[in-house]
Image (tube, helix red, strand yellow):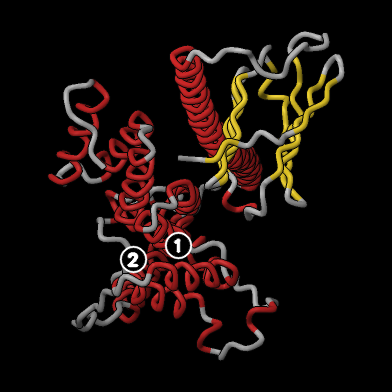
Amino acid sequence: MPLIVKDYTWTQTETIVYINVPLKGVKVGKVDIFSTDEYLKVHFPPFLFEAFLSEPIDDDKSTAKIGNGVAVFTLQKKKERLWEHLVINNNDKDKLREIRERALLKAQEKLAAESKAKATKTQEERKYALETMMKLEEEGRARIQKMKDDECEKATAQLEAWKLKQRQIAEEEAQLKLQSQRIKVDKQSKSEKIHVPRTSDQSKVKHDQKNSVQSISKKKQVDLPAPRSTGNIQIKFTPRVFPTALRESRVLEEEEWLQKQAEARRAINVNLAELKDLTEEERNPDWLKEKGDKLFATGNYLAAINAYSLAIKLNRKIPAIYSNRAACHLKLRNLHKAIEDSSWALDLLTPPVAGNAGARTRAHVRRGTAFCELELYTEGLQDYQAALTIDPQNETLQADTHKIRQIIQGSAPCSE
């Protein structure tokens, strides 16, 4: 049975009550304090101080300090007036037990409300972070689309200007040719004269014509080229990087994708402090990516993230590194970071062509999985549907998409 502390002291003003409870040499770590608006308890085995307050206090504004062997309580009164007594004068054990139980119930309700408020605040912060991230992603996509539209309009305007210039040149050439023909006809009409040859002249003319025809026929026989020799013509086909046939491909998008990949390989930032102690091989982002892949395969996800992060510092334009780091974050349940890395990968995987279809599918699935883990099933379904659009024959994607749709409709249980 605990020893009741009775040698406490208290003072008051119209707004505040001060209580000093001696701790009897007990260490601070063993002192347990519990208080509500009408009840105060200090338990430091084997001692117990218990106060059934005569009037209510504001528990949220009240404080307690422990030090120098004393617990000092500063209690804020709800009503500004002086109290006649600190505690109620009631020795009814049932009444006192009722006050204790009521105080305990109030404390439980207060704790539950604070926990609920904290959970609500956390959920709102997560939702706000996701909305902000999605807004930034949408703005980035809109900016890229605007750049593409502007380039398309510029190219179209240049093409139309070139066509107009070609038409003007063709018209000018046609006019010059027509003028040249007219001048030639006029000269021929002026130089022609009417001439009737005599008989001797006619025979001479016929003789000259005959000799001319013979000489022309001989000349034609001499000038005929020899028959062409037979042979084989070598045909070389232009190599194709993409698996689809050229007639089925979007050439402009493919060339843009290949150009972006080439620029990404060249865009290496070697002016980093972290590189001072690295070998030449370790400064290669491709080597770091392969190292991260091996670490991921062995389950060392933190080390894999470090390798991918250093590769990204060297080169921020390789989408596979962001996508693989997102997979590591998924394994470690860093869900917001997984969403961010997957979004970076999708931004870099443009334009959409056959050569990056697999990478886009993986990025959508990883971001969709992170959304579902955060119970944001609508956003997760959008990513899975995007992945299914790229790979419509994938049975696993079909099953997962159907399951997420059932969860949203409330016909399937949520699974971790």
Answer left or right for 397 relative to 189: left
Asked if residue 60 is positioned above or below residue 79 in the image, the reply reads below
Query: Would residue 387 be seen by someone viewing this image from the given angle?
Result: yes
Residue 166: percent from the left, percent from the top? 59, 43
- Circle 2: is it few (<14), some (14-19), or many (20+) Cα within 10 Å? few
Answer left or right for 374 relative to 173: left
Q: What amino acid is labelled 1 in the image?
A: Leu
Considering depth in this image, is 47 or 286 the residue closer to the camera? 47
The number of numbered badges drawn on the structure is 2
Answer left or right for 168 relative to 112: right
Q: Quadrant of residue 142?
A: top right
Instruction: Name the quarter where the N terminus is drawn.
Output: top left
Query: Disc 2 to disc 1, how far (Cα)?
Result: 9 Å
Residue 258 numbered mark, or none: 1
Residue labelled with disc 2? 241
Residue 52 numbered mark, or none: none
Residue 210: percent from the left, percent from the top? 35, 67
Question: CB atoms at circles 2 and 1 under 8 Å apart?
Answer: yes
Secondary structure at badge 1 equals helix
Residue 391: percent from the left, percent from the top? 22, 46
Instruction: Name the quarter where the C terminus is drawn.
Output: top left
Residue 150: percent from the left, percent from the top? 61, 38
